[in-house]
Amino acid sequence: MADHDQPVTDFEIDSDGLHGAQSGFLRVRRVHLRNIRADGSRSEPYVCDFVTRPKGPDAVVVALWHRGPDGAVEVLLRRGLRPALRLGRPPDELPVPDAEGDYPYLLEVVAGIIEREDVGRDGVLNRAAIEIAEESGYTVRPADVDFLGAGVFPTPGSMPEKFWLTHAQIVDKAASNPPSGDGSPMEEGASTQWMPLTEAIEACMSGRIEDAKTELCLRRLRDLLRPGV
């Protein structure tokens, strides 16, 4: 078996460093490494760059839903600022034009970073309840939030972040307060809306909703709630 056909069992790090301003939200970690193969041989050295986040590596995603008197399910969507889409996707460099086009707002479900003090599954559910209050204005107990299956890696080639998908039922749609937000300019101009679950999933297919975590979360919610949807 040639060296390159041997399975990789570990990595040997030659150098490891962080790049980016200390006050920034993200860092780029650059690792110079070699693959260690099952037979003990090493690959040629190469560079692996990936993004890290000092605040915490993972995020929680929340599908908030309400079942109406007719049994139909609606989900809460939030239109929030995403400057990276406006600044990082020059239209003349795209292989295919974006469906929604002129950002900076994006329609998605409630989500937020899991901070380092949020330990264990209970910590994740507690963070979900905090994000629900900040981004939707609804008050939900952590005990009323549940997981939608296993976590997923959205961009494993460039960021080690895992999304923990959750859901919570809103019994009374009218029982909301103005979202408190987190005090950041990133929260400016945010708005929320209710949409039928089936329509929201169709919007993901048509490109009106372009957020991958939202589509996955809504599809898992639909599978969970069947046959009532």
Image: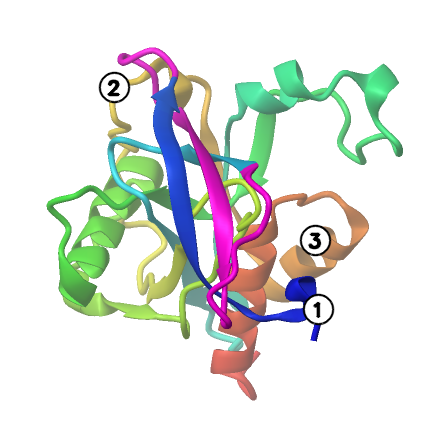
| Any part of residue 176 in sight | no
| Residue depicted at x 22% and y 60% | 125
* Residue at (53% x, 52% y) in the render: 154
* Residue 27 belongs to magenta span: yes
The amino acid marked with disc number 2 is: Gly
For disc 2, the marked residue is 183
Number of numbered discs overlaid on the protein picture: 3
The part of the image, by quadrant, that contains residue 145 is: bottom left
> Where is mark 1, residue-wise?
2
Of label 3 and label 1, which has the lower sequence position?
Answer: 1
Residue at image coords 51%, 78%: 71
SS type, badge 1: loop
* Quadrant position of residue 122: bottom left
The residue that label 3 is drawn on is 204
Residue 44 drawn in magenta: yes
Q: Which residues are magenta?
A: 20-46
Residue 54 in picture, x, y percent from top left: 26, 31
Asked if residue 142 shows in the view, the reply is yes
Residue 173: % across, % down:
36, 54
Horizontal arrangement in the rendering, residue 51 relative to residue 1 (left or right): left
Structural distance between the alpha carbons of marks 2 and 3: 29 Å
Quadrant (top left, top right, bottom left, bottom right) of the C terminus: bottom right
Q: Could you say where residue 43 lies in the image, as x and y percent from the top left?
A: 57, 51
| Amino acid type of the residue tagged 1 in the rendering | Ala
Amino acid carrying mark 3 in the image: Cys
At horizontal 33% and vertical 70% (from top left) the residue drawn is 147
Location of residue 157 in the rendering, given as x and y in whole percent from the top left corner: 57, 46
Q: Residues within 10 Å of mark 1 (few under 14, many from 20)?
A: few
